[in-house]
Amino acid sequence: MKFFGKFYYVFLAVIFLALFFILENASINGLIFPFSFAMLFALIWANQKIWLVAPAYLVAAIIVNHSLAGIISAIVCAAMIVVPFILHTIFKKNIQVWQLALYALFSQAGYIGFAAATGTNAVIFAVVSAVVGVVFMLGFVKLFEALFMRGFAYRLSVIEYVAGGIILIGLSAGLVNLDLYGFSFLKLFVSFVLLAITYCSKNYYSVFIASILGLGTLLSANNPVFFAPFVIWALAISPFKTYRKYFTALAIILAELVIGFYFNLYYSFDWLGILPVAISAIIFVLIPDKVYAIVKSIFDLRGDRAAIKNVVNQNRELLHRRLLSLSDVFGEMDRVFRGLVKRNLSEDEVKKLLRNEIIARNCETCPDRARCHRTREQDTLRVMDELTAIAFEKGKVTLLDIPSYLSANCGRVNGIITSAATLARQYKSYSGMLSNIDTSKLLIADQLKGISSVMKNLSQEVDHEIAFDGKREDKIIEELLFNDIVCTDAIVYERDAHTFEINLIVRNLDADKLKIPAIVGKICKCNMAVVDKYAATRPGYTALSLKTAPKLDCVFALANTPKSGSEVSGDTHSIMRLDGNRFMFAICDGMGSGSEAEQVSQTAISLIENFYKAGFDSELVLSSVNKLLSLQKEDKFSALDVCVLDLKSGLGDFIKMGAPCGFVMSEEDCKLVESGALPLGIVDKFNPVTKKLVVSDGDIVVMFSDGVADAFATDKSIEDFVKSAYSPNPQIIADKLLEQALANCNGRAMDDMTVLAIKIFNNQ
């Protein structure tokens, strides 16, 4: 292992030495040399081994220019990265990009100083080289950050592509001057690159790369001699991309022969001139396909997106059918459970049943049975009905309740009293048990109905194909990368003509940046909002879900205080986003005050939150919670005030069960939301007060518990005060209303007090 480790570092040293040697020879018109030192500083920034990179640069620079001026200048350049690197390491301070740029600029002091001794023009070109090199270095830094931090398998931004193109220009500009006895290393390098690029990517990539490499030779020597041949190579080998490799290799060799002998594009060309291209073609053919497969995976990362999207739509269709089937199953189970409910007998039927049972227990063995039930049947039944009614209503019977006719004519009065009281108690117990059983069955039926409804709604949501937008996906990734937000993937699709849904995979450190919705919204030409955020499958990355923001948005304010003398408030409030467009606001006032009332209201509000989050509609939510609370042995109930705002349509649903009135106010108007209905948990059947109102920009919804309402004489007095306390700031309204309620009670809270104010505003 140690041997291979050393070999690896030797291999790296050779690569760095060759890279710097080529870039030291690279120039713009033989006057500006910005490539080599820019690469040096960028590689150090990218955490490459400084003890390999710096010596490789120094050796290459001295080989190219071994004059005294060249040696000193190269040493100064290398020292300006080595010394700061050591100092930053000692003081444990990371090098910032702006510091790196300054070090790179000062590293050219040697070249500028020696140029000053030569003449004015030399100084100008040396300064220009330094400035251009710093600019190139910043681009290289962006590119290396992308490659070493995100890896090769992720899309590059425009700046990073430009930086890669500059590196290719530098390599071709350096290689154009490196001929060995007429053997062109430039042709060897370019022909192999074009063969590999054509084989592993789209055809136009090779033409684009050929143009860049030709541009490098043009900038280096002001000579376009290689520009046309490189483009012709790319065009010649592109048609053979789908065939075997040796056809592509043969095509570039034939193209070089035609260029050299027929078009005569080179200054001089003979049979040996074909050697660099032939060698690169042989190397290209000999490299195993496994190596090219790795490179192909880089270029084809997004090439299979169409297939993936088709699979997504197919799975949505399958999910739609299965959800619809499950909805039918739960709907049928709902009907079955409702059919199992055993309704209680009517009151008259119960009284008749109890009367007959009392007669059966006491009169069957009585010797006077014939006299009472034949001769005096009508009187006996009338008296027994009276006695049964008393037992049914009171639950017991005493001697004072016995009719005079019965006490004068019956010798078994005590037995009748005992039987009547016992049967009445037994029936009450049985009736309560039966009612609870029926309530439980209805509760289960309600849940089955709710699940059926939720699944049906889900099936409708997925019952249409998603229209993906590949162009916007590419633009979003590029724009985010341009703004230093690393986005490895983006999915854009339209739910309808006005709603976009977008999923992004970004770095954890970028996930909370506020400019992400603004950037995405600019590309989609609408306001976007982040509706969900969760960990991505790749460590260190976060998945963001964005959706077209609704036309309205809201802010809210809370003011509350417990009952004087209580440590905790029995009022519980809930503020919850149900989905991207809907908000739920609720105040739940538990019976009494203190910790017990808090527990009651907390239980109710928790149930309501969970039902709403599951997607149940309001009527089913309240019915289910009411049944659950009514099953408790203790008489515990809660007043409930709910407001569900749809910020897309501007529709507000107001639901009140035992809660005081509320208001929807603006600067010009104040609408009353009436109170009424029994609180949750008192009776099985419930009839909440509901109201629908359209809210708009500037409206403020005011909700409060009965502790606040009871502090005012009438609803009209509350309305008058709320109008006078109007403010665009909902917190001011909430605070003023609570302060006035306390003032009306001489500063003492006679009950738990809670005020919730919600301000609606335009989001467009």
Image (tube, rainbow, N blue to C red):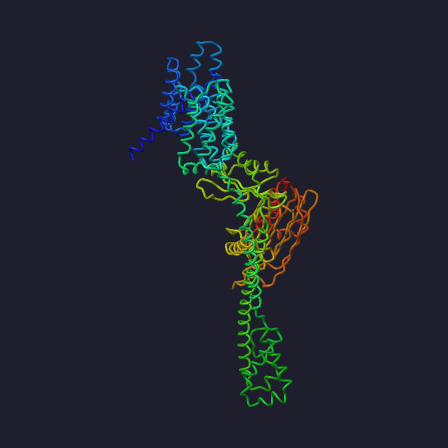
Number of numbered callouts drawn: 0
Which quadrant does the N terminus fall into?
top left
Which quadrant does the C terminus fall into?
top right
Q: Residue at x 58, y 81 (%)?
A: 356
Left or right? Give the position of 113 relative to 325: left
- x, y percent for residue 443: 55, 62
Q: Nearer the viewer, residue 750 or 689?
A: 689
Q: Nearer the viewer, residue 270 or 688?
A: 270
- x, y percent for residue 248: 46, 33
- x, y percent for residue 657: 61, 57
Q: Which image quadrant for residue 369? A: bottom right
Q: Is residue 1 above or below residue 96?
A: below
Can I make out residue 150 in this image? no
Residue at the far left in the pictured view: 2
Q: Nearer the viewer, residue 744 or 46?
A: 46
Q: Nearer the viewer, residue 216 or 249?
A: 249
Left or right? Give the position of 130 relative to 424: left
Residue at the far right in the pictured view: 668
Q: Is residue 42 above or below residue 413?
A: above
Can I make out residue 559 in this image? yes
- x, y percent for residue 295: 44, 36
Q: Which image quadrant for residue 412? A: bottom right
